[in-house]
Image (cartoon, rainbow, N blue to C red):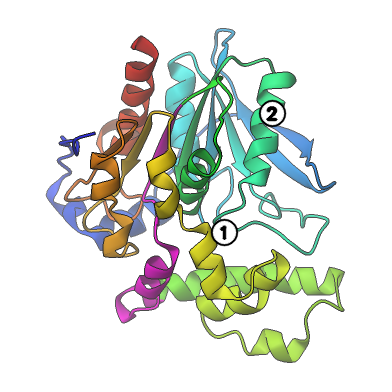
Amino acid sequence: MPILQNTYKPRFYFKSGLISTVYSGLARRVEISQKRERLTLSDGDFIDLDWSFSEEKSNACIVLLHGLEGHAQRPYLTGAAQLFNKNKIDAVSVNFRGCSGEINSKFRSYHSGATEDLVDIIQHLISIKKYDKIYLKGISLGANIILKYLGERDTIPTEVKAAIAISAPCDLNGACEELHKLKNKPYSMRFLKHLKASLQLKMEKFPNQMSLETFNNIKTLRDFDNVYTAKAHGFKDAADYYKQCSSLQFLPNIKTPTLIINALNDSFLSPDCYPVKEAKNNANLYLEMPKYGGHVGFVDQNNVYYNEMRALEFVKSVSEN
């Protein structure tokens, strides 16, 4: 599809990628009532789902996936859940393995290409919850998971009608290189701190899986992916993990209407994270590249973010066709 024009015009101070990213991550607040459900996964582990509902009984549900070291109470999920609930669509905000406040039962956890858990969630919504319209929306790492899920398989359940990917790191190696640059050091160090804290809990539960010496040698996000993410999830090393799980290679095969919104001033994204060629050559893939927005920082009016309103508009447009 042609590259979409955008109408995002933030206030002048939110034109800064830094300000919009930091404000959205630290200052935004969204009040919403959620009900937790624990889902047993195919491999015997568990994942926690936090539900919010439309006031009217709905046959439609949006699945919301968070980013690296996020959870289902992050405003970028609850904001979308609230908006969709007001528009007669239930929302399930997913906590990836180990992200709900309780360590999961296996040494493995989640990663940018872990689509098997999304498969289980969607099947649960279809067979148990009986939804016949399912929409997917992912943020950052969650966006890459959704894009990979849609493009790596030949068939998608007919109930899955549309998807939205926000601030999607389509090229994981390139995004990792950006995160390691000086401009992003505060972010990468914050991510690393949280990841290592989670890994310490894993090591207490699985003392034979990693030595203290190996743990202490983790100095960067790439180190973390080399010694934990790759080894715990069946990859050779970080490079192999990035190569196999980057969604860019799967975009040509996407058959579900899908909207990608990646801001041009997103300091986390490398040039290959803007899949212009793939969008132009796939009638199901829509790419929007606002000049502003930072990383998940599309601040707009009345505490409803631009990407959230665009997600709702996209879902409605798909439903009408």
User: Helix, strand, or loop for circle 1?
Assistant: loop
**Residue at image x 33%, y 41%?**
260
**Which image quarter is the N terminus in?**
top left
Magenta region includes residue 172: yes
User: Helix, strand, or loop for circle 2?
Assistant: helix
**Residue at image x 65%, y 56%?**
110
Q: Is residue 168 above or below residue 118?
A: below
Residue 62 at what x, y percent from top left?
Answer: 52, 27
Q: Is residue 318 above or below residue 63?
A: above
Q: State the CA–CA distance, disc 1 to disc 2.
A: 25 Å
Q: Earlier in the sequence, mark 1 or mark 2?
A: 1
Residue 220 at what x, y percent from top left?
Answer: 51, 81
| Amino acid at pointer 2 | Gln
- Nearest the camera: 11 or 287? 287
| Amino acid at pointer 1 | Glu
Disc 2 target residue = 123
| Res. 69 mark | 1
Q: Left or right: where does residue 263 sit relative to residue 128?
A: left
Query: Alpha-carbon neighbours of circle 1 within 10 Å: few (<14), some, or many (≥20)?
Result: some
| Res. 297 mark | none
**Residue at image x 66%, y 53%?**
99
Magenta region includes residue 54: no
Q: Left or right: where does residue 289 sit relative to residue 218?
A: left
Question: Nearer the observer, disc 1 or disc 2?
Answer: 2
**Residue at image x 47%, y 27%?**
82
Query: Alpha-carbon neighbours of circle 2 within 10 Å: few (<14), some, or many (≥20)?
Result: some
Q: Quadrant of residue 265?
A: bottom left
Residue 28 at what x, y percent from top left?
Answer: 40, 46
Residue stretch rendered in magenta on the structure: 162-185
Q: Is residue 22 above or below residue 217?
A: above
